Image (cartoon, rainbow, N blue to C red):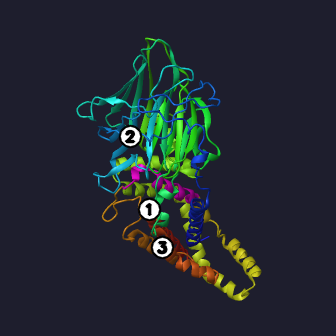
Amino acid sequence: MTSTRNLLLIALLFISYLLWMEWEKDYGPAPATTPAASTSAADAAATPAADGSTPAPVAGTPPSGTPATSTPASDASSTPPVAPVVVSTDVLRVEIDPRGGNIVVADLLAYPKQPKDFANPVRLLDHSDAHFFVAQSGLLSAQGSSLVAPDHQALYQSAQASYKLDGGDTLEVPLTWSQPDGLSVRKVFVFKRGSYVIEQREEISNHGTQAWNGNAYRQLQRVPPVIDTSGIKGFSNIERYSFAGAAIYSPEDKFEKLKFDGFHKEPLAKSFAGGWAAMLQHYFFAAWIPTTSETDSYSTLQIANPHGPRYLIRAMSPLLSVAPGQSRSESARLYIGPKLQSSLDQIAPGLSLTIDYGMFKVIAEPLHWLLTQFHKLTGNWGFAIILLVLLIKALFFKLSEAQYRSGARMRKLQPRLAALKERYGDDRQKFAAAQMELFQKEKVNPLAGCLPMLIQIPVFFALYWVLLESVELRQAPFIAWIHNLSAPDPYFVLPVLNAAVMIATQYLTPMAGMDPLQAKMMKIMPVIFSVLFAFFPAGLVLYYVVNGGLGVLQQWIITRRIEAHEKAAT
């Protein structure tokens, strides 16, 4: 198998893979829209009044280990808006809605929407209808409890309208809620310098004459992320291929992805300790992380909304109890930020699994680690990719050498193969037999070139997903005109260079004896690949250009050595 045939194989495999992903996006199961009349009983709970009164109890059996409680209402659209509390750190700008003490806006200051436009950072959490994505939390009183607890629509009070992390490393933002002769709750958000983790503490004090029993809950609610699929972006619109939905992690079942369409068909109902619940999208995510000793009940819900269905994932604590005159504190952590593979598992077990490399994960993770190490050396992700190519070439040097030596011997046999083809004409069976006899006589293995390429195909696919999913490479510049390695080459220079490399490869590859139709296909392969690579991330094309260029150089040197050896022998 020649190098050009190997390129054809990669092209066919890659195009088939991308077409399959396109088919899944266009014709796979779409999220079901639940009409308002069919909203579940949990969502039909009475909306709390402005004073924070408890919703009416909902009939049904609660999750195992959880008392019968009123179910948190899912939508506060009927309540009047309140000015948010704005919090700014070195990496986050968030808005906390006093109505429920929910985080309804979160800007990631280190990640601009467009390269270098830091005035317009990525907004991960957003309370607008089109991009709705919020983090909510609250308390629920058990059925039969006379004490009212603040759910995620209760009105809290704040001493300040804004907070900013200036001199210190920690910033606390307190909100308060109270009922006369009942409960008082102090909800505190703790921000730390350089961190995307927000600690939330709910300090519950019982001033009544009866014990309070109930649950704490935390939930993420959102609409599917809006993806622009217009124009001719096609395969270059990498957000289309990244998973968007919910996820949970438990020590027993590990990481589980939950598609939005499954919220209605197969709602989640699990209880476990030491896990977390998240909402994922391309490059970024949010996750509620309860304390590891707490066995929470996890559930999902699809909510009808005039602007389209919303999807909710919730973690509810086990039964809490606060005796009269006593206090207790409940805490959880909220991660709002990028998918940074190097640091996520330090925050919570399995959190790095939110980076979705798909079936090539086992190869993609080491590749990402290698790229990170090379980036530390060079300070440039483009040069890191080049160093990765050099390392892969070094590892596969002997295999590649065997491939090119086989190619050089095949080149020498081309006149004899052409004579055989002319002798046997259209009798393919006799021609194939004579061809194999010639290969055996000359000790040439035509399949010797297959193994190096077959080994590198998984590397090629894995690197494709590393470039697509690694937020570190998002908008990473290389040199000159390439300002974003995760986007296509704006001037198509790399695709043209790749075509030139392929033409040079064909020049060094024996083509005689090949079927005429196949020979024509090989000649137009540089054009096909140039068009295909014009829509691929520049980093991936850079990898292939450097890999192919080094292959041409290696093939040329080996071919010249064999020719020189043969001349010396004669």
**Which of the 4 image quadrants contains residue 497?**
bottom left
Name the residue beneath numbered marker 3. 531
Residue 331 tag number = none
Per the image, is 281 magenta? no
Foreground pick, 369 / 401: 369
What secondary structure is marked by label 2? loop
Of labels 2 and 3, earlier in sequence is 2
Looking at the picture, does residue 88 appear above or below residue 380? above
In the displayed structure image, the side of residue 461 where residue 89 appears, left or right: left
What secondary structure is marked by label 1? loop
Looking at the picture, does residue 174 appear above or below residue 340? above
Mark 2 against mark 1, which lies toward the viewer? 2
**Which span is picked out in magenta?**
455-475
Give neighbour class at mark 3: few <14, some 14-19, many 20+ (Cα, 10 Å): some
Mark yes or no: residue 275 visible.
Answer: no
Foreground pick, 47 / 112: 47
Q: Residue at x 52, y 42 (%)?
A: 312
In the displayed structure image, the side of residue 428 where residue 331 appears, left or right: left
Name the residue beneath numbered marker 1. 537
Residue type at numbered disc 2: Pro
Q: Position of residue 262 (x, y in %)?
A: 61, 47
Name the residue beneath numbered marker 2. 80
Give neighbour class at mark 1: few <14, some 14-19, many 20+ (Cα, 10 Å): many
Residue type at numbered disc 1: Pro
In space, the residues marked 2 and 3 are separated at their CA atoms by 54 Å
Residue type at numbered disc 3: Val
In the displayed structure image, the side of residue 324 where residue 296 appears, left or right: right
Q: Split into 4 quadrants, where in the image is the C terminus? A: bottom right
**Secondary structure of the magenta portion, mostly?**
helix
Q: Position of residue 269 (x, y in %)?
A: 62, 36
Q: Position of residue 242 (x, y in %)?
A: 51, 53
